[in-house]
Every structure is written in structure tokens, then in C-alpha cells.
């Protein structure tokens, strides 16, 4: 697939509190609505930002979506995940 679909998913999560809540309720089901391959769906559902970055997704969009789901307290987790890039 392409990084564009991952970026669209993270943009949607990051710009809409309602979408972020839908993601929190059922990450795997949320990932199904985007045109992603199985690996991308798994990365999105688990918020594996390191893997999504390796796949070419913008780290800025990843940060935005991650923070929308995890909140400011998740910054350390984000930094650990993105360092696996």
C-alpha cells in the first residue's frame, strides 16, 4: 500500500476528538475502514509509530494522531516508539 493511507488515518484521528475516541474504543475495527495492508492495519491498531515511520508516514502526523489518542502523558511512549525507526 502507501504511506498516504496511514497518514490519512492518523490525520483523521488527530483532527477529530470523536475519531480519536472511536479509535480508542476499537483500534482494530477502526483500522479496517482505511485501505491498508495487513501489516499497516496492525501498525495503526497498535500505534506502532516506529513501524509507520519506516513505511514512510510523516512523523509529524504520527505525533499528532498519537497525542490525540494517548494525550500529553504519552510523549515518552511516542519517543520510544519513534526511535525504533
Image (cartoon, grey):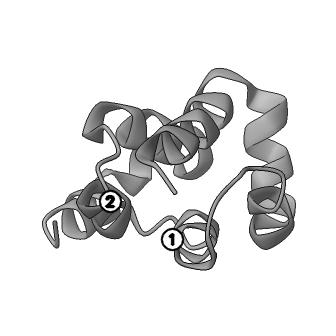
Give whichever of discs 1 and 2 has the lower sequence position: 1
**Residue 36 locus on image (x, y percent):** 64, 60
- 29 lies above or below 22: below
The foreground one among 36 and 82 is 36
Residue at the outermost front position: 1
7 or 78, which is in the foreground?
A: 7
Residue 5 at x, y percent in the picture: 57, 43
Q: Quadrant of the C terminus?
A: bottom left
Cβ atoms under marks 1 and 2 closer than 8 Å: yes
Mark 1 Cα-neighbour bin, 10 Å: few <14, some 14–19, many ≥20: some
Q: Which mark is residue 55?
A: 2
Between 51 and 65, the one lying in front of the other is 51
Give the secondary structure at mark 2.
Answer: loop
Which residue is under mark 1? 43
- Label 2: few (<14), some (14–19) or many (≥20) C-alpha neighbours in 10 Å: some
Provide residue 47's location: percent of width, then percent of height: 51, 64
Q: Is residue 85 left or right of residue 43?
A: left
Q: Is residue 18 above or below residue 23?
A: above
The extreme top residue here reads 15
Residue pictured at 24% horizontal, 62% vertical: 54
- Residue at 32% x, 65% y is 77
Question: Where is residue 8 drawn, in percent x and y?
Answer: 59, 34
The residue that appears at 73% across and 41% down in the rendered structure is 20
Q: What secondary structure is found at the residue carrying circle 1?
A: helix
Amino acid at each position: 500500500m502507501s504511506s498516504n493511507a496511514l497518514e490519512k488515518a492518523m490525520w483523521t484521528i488527530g483532527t477529530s476528538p470523536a475519531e480519536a475516541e472511536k479509535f480508542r474504543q476499537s483500534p482494530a475495527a477502526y483500522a479496517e475502514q482505511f485501505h491498508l495492508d495487513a501489516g499497516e492495519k496492525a501498525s495503526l491498531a497498535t500505534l506502532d509509530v516506529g513501524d509507520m515511520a519506516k513505511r514512510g508516514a510523516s512523523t509529524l502526523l504520527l505525533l499528532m494522531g498519537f497525542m490525540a489518542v494517548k494525550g500529553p502523558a504519552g510523549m515518552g511512549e511516542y519517543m520510544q516508539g519513534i526511535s525504533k525507526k
